Image (cartoon, helix red, strand yellow):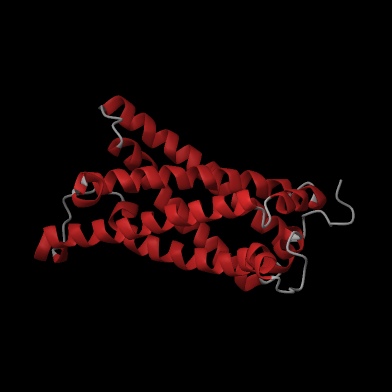
């Protein structure tokens, strides 16, 4: 199958899964913003997205997309390294237009993967997984607001999440327009437009996540009992 065996097919899989993950991040960020205004409303969303069959199916689908994106990223990176051979060790000062993110996508990907594992441990494990396995945790599985408060009351987690979000921003700022180019958005005019759209969109997306982290870190979020 050309999607698996050819280089172009692998890039298409990378692009499509990447776009799908960006859409998920958009939903996730929008959901997190709710926590800045109402803890009760946020927990209502968490309860709706608990261990229901549709939430479990969506989680499995999201996991499959993530695994596919990561696996194909490593395959393409290894393929590119083999193609370049010893040239990858040469110092090339003649390519100023090559973005830093483009040259360090593997490193950024590893940081993002480690951050994702931390995020899954802090939230998914304590919430959906605990509900599915009937494990008693500190807070109720649907009390996502309390888990956010507890997580970002820890300065170490705050720093780690900021580093994680910065890595995601660098990754997406390159990956967004690269995905659009792969799926067929060609031409210099639209190429430059997608680069600008991607930069603005991913910046706003990561800013949304960052605001939530900092609001809870500095105690600016509403309390659960006083939430409107």
In this rendering, the answer to whether 1 lies above or below 81 is above
For this rendering, which residue is in front, 5 or 211? Answer: 5
In the image as oriented, which residue stretches furthest toward the front? 53
For this rendering, which residue is in front, 143 or 82? Answer: 143
Number of disc labels: 0
Taking the spot 51% from the left edge, 56% from the top edge, the residue there is 60
In the image, taking residue 39 as reference, residue 31 lies left or right, namely left
In this rendering, the answer to whether 34 lies above or below 225 is above
Residue 147 visible? The answer is yes
In the image, taking residue 145 as reference, residue 67 lies left or right, namely left
In the picture, the quarter occupied by the C terminus is top right
Q: x, y percentage for residue 138? A: 76, 73
Quarter of the image for residue 141 reads bottom right
In the image as oriented, which residue stretches furthest toward the left? 86
Q: x, y percentage for residue 39? A: 79, 53
In the image, taking residue 205 as reference, residue 101 lies left or right, namely left
Taking the spot 25% from the left edge, 46% from the top edge, the residue there is 3
For this rendering, which residue is in front, 126 or 151? Answer: 126
In the image as oriented, which residue stretches furthest toward the right? 226
Taking the spot 44% from the left edge, 40% from the top edge, the residue there is 199
In the image, taking residue 110 as reference, residue 97 lies left or right, namely left
Q: x, y percentage for residue 73? A: 31, 57
Residue 104 visible? The answer is no
Q: x, y percentage for residue 108? A: 39, 61
Taking the spot 26% from the left edge, 28% from the top edge, the residue there is 188
């Amino acid at each position: 199958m050309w999607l698996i065996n050819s280089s172009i097919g692998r890039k298409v899989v990378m692009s499509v899964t990447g776009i799908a993950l960006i859409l998920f991040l958009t939903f996730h960020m929008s959901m997190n913003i709710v926590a800045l205004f109402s803890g009760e409303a946020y927990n209502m969303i968490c309860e709706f997205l608990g261990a229901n069959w549709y939430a479990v199916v969506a989680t499995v689908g999201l996991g499959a997309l993530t695994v596919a994106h990561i696996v194909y990223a490593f395959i393409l990176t290894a393929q590119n390294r083999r193609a370049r051979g010893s040239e990858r060790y040469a110092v090339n000062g003649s390519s100023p237009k090559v973005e830093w993110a483009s040259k360090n996508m593997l490193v950024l990907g590893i940081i993002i993967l480690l951050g994702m594992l931390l995020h899954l441990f802090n939230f998914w494990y304590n919430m959906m997984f605990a509900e599915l396995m009937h494990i008693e945790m500190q807070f109720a599985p649907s009390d996502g607001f309390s888990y956010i408060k507890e997580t970002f009351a820890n300065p170490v987690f705050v720093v780690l999440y900021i580093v994680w979000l910065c890595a995601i921003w660098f990754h997406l700022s390159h990956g967004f327009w690269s995905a659009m180019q792969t799926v067929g958005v060609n031409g210099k005019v639209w190429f430059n437009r997608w680069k600008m759209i991607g930069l603005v969109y991913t910046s706003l997306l990561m800013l949304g996540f960052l605001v939530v982290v900092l609001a809870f870190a500095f105690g600016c979020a509403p309390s659960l009992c006083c939430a409107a």
